Image (tube, rainbow, N blue to C red):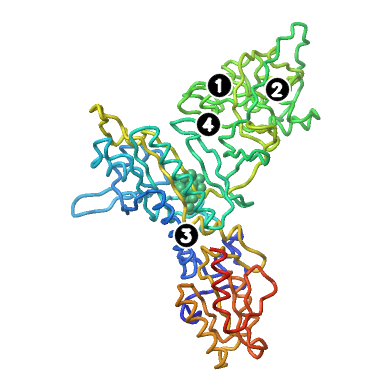
Amino acid sequence: MRWSQTFIPTMKEVPAEAEVPSHQLMLRAGLIRQLMAGAYTYLPLGYRSVRKVSEIVREEMDKAGAIELFMPALQPIEIFERTGRREAFGNVLFNFEVKKGDRKLHLALGPTHEEVITDLMARHISSYRQLPITLYQIQTKFRNEERPRFGVLRTSEFLMKDAYSFGASLEQLNAAYEAMYNAYCRIFERCGLKYLPVEADSGPIGGDASHEFMVPADNGEDFVVHCAKCGYAANQERADTGRVSQLPAKIAEAAAPAKVDTPNVGTIDQVSQLLKSDAKSFIKTLIYKADGKPVAILLRGDHTANEGKIRRATKAASVELADEATILKVTGAPVGFAGPVGILCPCFADHDVALITSAIVGANSKDAHLTGVIPGTHFELSETFDLRNGESSDPCPKCTGFLQIVHGIEVGHVFKLGTKYSVSMDATFVDAQEQSHPIIMGCYGIGVTRVVASIVETCHDANGIIWPLAVAPYSVQLIPLNVTDADVMKITNTIYGELTGDGIDVLMDDRDHRPGFKFKDADLIGIPLRITIGGKGLAEGITEVKWRTETVAKKVPIAETVAFVKGLIAEKS
Ligand code: ATP
Ligand code: MG
């Protein structure tokens, strides 16, 4: 492709609206343009990378035995009502009414396709003999994201590869899951991404039924706990905080806690400043409603509550923070002064609460705290639970190392669904004994456009993008130094013709600009290999060839340039 004939609107200035490197660079390198919040045009250069990533995804899906199909984005709202996801998605689901003749149709735009594909399979699968099967598509998804941001890292319309496995047994599910997991590793590797498969929410099957693939990046919106020693990695929300501590014995002769005045200070920060003590010696008492009934959740003062874990510990279907009236009822005090001593609801204590020997707690009366509170002595402690998010100083649950928090971008997700959708959409099969069962499903997503943004986010320097070869819009950029010089253009055109003839993607910067200007743009758009033709080199009979990451170019005889460049590409492929 000749630069003058395509459309690459590069920008010199860093656009003010772009906060993160990938957003800035994708705008500046002419890869994307915003139409409105959350909706982007992929310009020719950006779209080439999207297609390259899609093709890698497609090849690896096919290799893993998945079968491609293509489903409509436009869907009837009823299918979301059948699975209960109209409510679960809430505002995220784009849905609207349209008129058709004198009827009204209520439609949705697919945020994923579990409903559509399960409905399809329900109509066509009847016997175990037709299973297992995994189907996939690469298609546009619509989610009315609360906060679309960071360019195409989070948009309301984005390209996703979504795959769905259907099996007759847990073994078939596990085999499909493993095939997808391994395909994901190959995909992200081929895309040149550093990635971390992390244990995610376990869902209905339990165990390690779900993994997210995270790209470590400072601007990632997800938090992962990671042990550098053994490699354990989990979503912060899911991570085990490990150690069940020994329950403290009741001390018969212990002094009673002291009541101290803490007027108008209710937060742990404020009270710890006032009493000059560390947050770690506080027991934070949070009042939740578990299926509508008040419970007190006890955590060490510097820890944060994890609602998923609280839900599991209290065996409730739903939990939410209690309202002020409930807090007043169970503590006798306004918000900020709750404590476990004498509280009027069941308490659930985190494991680490048992390790505090002398604690500061809310006194369950306005403007007062208790100090010298001994867990198990001044309030009952017969069992402890894992109720909090993992933190960077926690011991690793798998080895003797310590956890650290890593920020990550979720680029993919594999999930053992079980029978949630097959039950609600009546997708069943009969086994060899003619017994009917719901089909056992898995789902597997990759954000294709987010992958492209993640590559830019993690592969760049101060001058621009550094594309990994496999996903670069073009592999080679030709820079003739002087386009008005017939000799220069003759050699450039010959090299261009030979490389493209061999199936190599080449961009020729045929614009009549100064070399410095063209080099700047070349660094910005980040094509992996650059061949410079002209100037002194031409007199010496050479071209200059360099990788985007190299500072010094290699001088290569003109006649050998094509073979040399093909060799470099072959080495990397
Ligand atoms: P997130 O937590 O980032 O909102 P999710 O967990 O809701 O994502 P999934 O339903 O697991 O997303 O979708 C599969 C993949 O689609 C994700 O791993 C991610 O790569 C991509 N994806 C999801 N939402 C978006 C979005 N708004 N913009 C771009 N890609 C997205
Ligand atoms: Mg996800």
N-terminal-most mark, 1 or 3:
3
State which mark lies toward you, 3 or 4.
3
How many angstroms separate mark 3 from mark 4 (CA)? 34 Å
Closer to the camera in the image, 30 or 374: 30
Distance CA(mark 2)–CA(mark 4) = 24 Å
- In the image, 352 versus 444, the foreground residue is 444
Of labels 2 and 4, the one closer to you: 4
Specify the farthest residue to the top: 252
Secondary element at image label 3: helix
Q: Secondary structure at mark 1?
A: strand
| Dot 2: element | strand
In this orientation, which residue lies closer to the viewer: 559 or 323?
Answer: 559
Vertical placement of residue 334 versus 470, above or below = above
Amino acid beneath label 3: Val
Residue type at tag 4: Gly
Q: What residue is shown with label 4? A: 308
Q: Can you give x and y, in whole percent of width and height, for residue 254 in the image? A: 77, 10
Whether residue 298 is visible, yes or no, is yes
